[in-house]
Image (tube, helix red, strand yellow):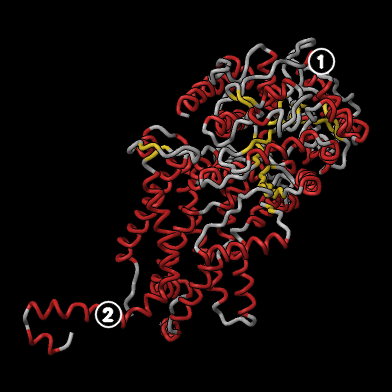
Amino acid sequence: MTARSLQSGAPARERAATPSTWSRIWQNDAPGYLFLLPWLIGFIGLTVGPMVTSLYLSFTDFDLLTSPDWVGADNYIRMFTNDAKFWTSMRVTMFFVIFSVPLKLAFALAVAMLLNRGIRGLPLYRALFYLPSLLGASVAIAILWRQIFAGDGLVNKLLLLVGIEGPSWISNPQYSLWTLIVLSIWQFGSPMIIFLAGLRQIPTDMYEAASLDGASKWRQFVKITLPLLTPVVFFNAIIQTIEAFKSFTPAFIISGGTGNPINSTLFYTLYLYQEAFAFFRMGYASALAWVLLAVVGVFTAFSFFTSKYWVHYDE
Amino acid sequence: MTIRIDRRHFLMGSSALIAAGAAGISPAFAQAERLRMLFWGGQARADRTYAVTDLYQAAKGTDVEGEFLAWNDYWPKLATQTAGGNAPDIIQMDYRYIVEYAQRNAIAPLDEFVGGALKLDDFDADQLEGGKVDGSLYGISLGANSVALMVNTTAFEEAGVAAPTRDLTYDEIMAMGEAFNSANVRGGMKVIMDGSGSEPMLDNWLRQKGLALYTADGKLGFDADAMTEWFQLWSQMREAGVCVSAEDQALDTGPHETTMLVLGKAAMMPSNSNQLVGFQAVMQDDITISSYPRLAAGVGGGHYRKPSMFFSVAGSSANKEAAAEFLSFFVNDPEAAAVLGVERGIPCSAAVRDAIAPTLSEQDQIALNFVANLGDLLGPLPPSPPAAAGEIDISLLRTLSQEVGFGARSPEDAGPYFVTEATAILNRA
């Protein structure tokens, strides 16, 4: 708004000025919105629309073939009071998240530290170590995993060399979830790349000063590397936790979509998929999806809340 | 997922789409002379099916565009397309789902076309009956089949054990298993897979006891004691090393390649007669089929000739009559029948059976003879199962059989648990 229109002060003038203000905004911002349009259409049509629909469906009984019946909060009530499989799948997923995320981050950090020593051919190693992340969630790798961890698979053949007769890892309920955790750790590539970038940010003179003062390598790691890396650790932890909650393909392929043996790999997402596409309870499956969203939201909020106690953004 | 559209049609289709989009009208794909068909199966089935659609195109000038998926992917796809009002004209349908789809008008009754576009003059009465829901014809059976044990005859020869006959009993399996174990072929191959989680095998066993998996009104047809006895039977076999271990059995997640038979861990496994073709295709050893074991010598009635699958017409189809005409061609035309063989089951038209009998391969002959000569093993066709049967099979029977197998639950505990949970699932659906 120009100085002149402010001086006039009369409400009538103000109202008269409005159209021209709007047209000015339009003239200034229209190109921006126009460029946004393809994304905006996609976002509203393919993300917001389906989400709102699924929120509505979560309060209904819907089998795809007949129209949805409104059942109020029944789906949510059933989930928490009368569905043992819901709790089983929640427990499996929590176990997976709690073990796979820290182990994967630790492994990624360890490899990043190794690669951060200025070795020759670094780009090659970086690419090689990143490769599993590109392949890891694929169907082919899940099938390969089945072969490696089967009773007569590669792992047991190696164990046999040292005289140990291993079980069939993927089909034994005691170990099957661990094979999926190992598969997840193996896809350490993307947190590793981010750690590597974070390590490069730490000024080398700090290490020089520390070693002049006689600090051991371990002490340097604990007192310099880790504190300065906490923002990166925090970022990786959030991203990987969300990824772990959403994990689906490996369990789906390795167990043939059943979550077996004895529901030991029944990830929450797998249970959701079964309810929706094997038993056609779209309403219940939608409710499951919203509960997952809430759980991930709570986890993330909790991480942000605790972050002020352990993440150091200061110089 | 595999769609077969040739390039000309693809280009025509996409240009039509663009033109329609530009003109602001919706494309009218569902006009006559073009039908869409969806079916489940593998490449062998697809090749045969597409050969028939080519024949039909040549004979009648109507295009039938087929698309096929694996069983597990098929049902979500079909349900989604049906819900979106975009169901294919011709739908391959299973006995398990036909009632559900018919009652929701997702598939159309075909009675009005019978005698006209749809000729079923010498169609087997029991197969025709199997496609009826509440007295109306909703599905045309594409072949009869029966449950059958796949038997690896090569392995039996190696072990020096006589292959099973149609008089095989559960007790004899125990004896065979011990003979197999002492022969110790192929790194400890067992005589049979663990069948405790196999719904058809349980069904067959119950029928021989005069019980049923489900009653006509969709309730459970047996009690906790029967179920306990079933789990005990298999626990005994597992402990004696007659069937495979729980750990091995858990490798089987459905596809042929993960089964104990194909993995070479067991010489026999329960399956269906029309699957012989599919199993033989992925195995080096010679495979044949035999009947499921009897409870005791002379006890029969467990088997039945079931429609292996149907073709149905979508309730929303704009070309129901054209679709019915194609179905008629599919089940009656001698040339089509020669291409199809018995891959979907034994053809239901007597004339077709006679026409193709001399041209059949060895496996096809075995399957045909098996289904034709069930004799005292044959019982009546059970009523179609309730809608929740699939869930009880997948999330209860199979999981519970693993719990017993791994020792997490005793048979005495699993029996009552199964009945309670199955009843809850049936009441919920």
Q: Chain of mark 1?
A: B
Q: From the viewer's perspective, is A24 left or right of A284?
A: left
Residue located farthest toward the right when viewing the structure as drawn: B358
> SS at mark 1?
helix
Residue A242 badge: none
Q: Give the amino acid at mark 1.
A: Gly
Q: Give the amino acid at mark 2.
A: Ile
Compared with A100, B399 (above or below) is above
Q: Quadrant of residue B253?
A: top right
Q: Chain of mark 2?
A: A
Q: Quadrant of residue B89?
A: top right
Q: Residues within 10 Å of mark 2 (few under 14, many from 20)?
A: few
Compared with A194, A297 (above or below) is above
Label 1 vs label 2: CA separation? 86 Å
Residue behind mark 1: B375
Report the residue at 85% width, 39% height from top.
B335
Are labels 1 and 2 assigned to the same chain?
no
Q: From the viewer's perspective, is B112 left or right of B172?
A: left
Report the residue at 62% width, 40% height from top.
A172
Q: How far from the left and from the top, in percent, is residue B424?
A: 47, 25
Q: Residues within 10 Å of mark 1 (few under 14, many from 20)?
A: few
Compared with A33, B100 (above or below) is above
- Look at the image and tell me whether residue B242 can be seen: no
Q: How far from the left and from the top, in percent, is residue B131?
A: 66, 27
> SS at mark 2?
helix
Task: Determine contact: label 1, label 2, CB under 8 Å.
Answer: no
Residue behind mark 2: A25
- Report the front residue among B336 and B233: B336
- Report the front residue among A233 and B428: B428
Report the residue at 74% width, 23% height from top.
B305
- Look at the image and tell me whether residue B429 can be seen: yes
Q: How far from the left and from the top, in percent, is residue B9?
A: 70, 59
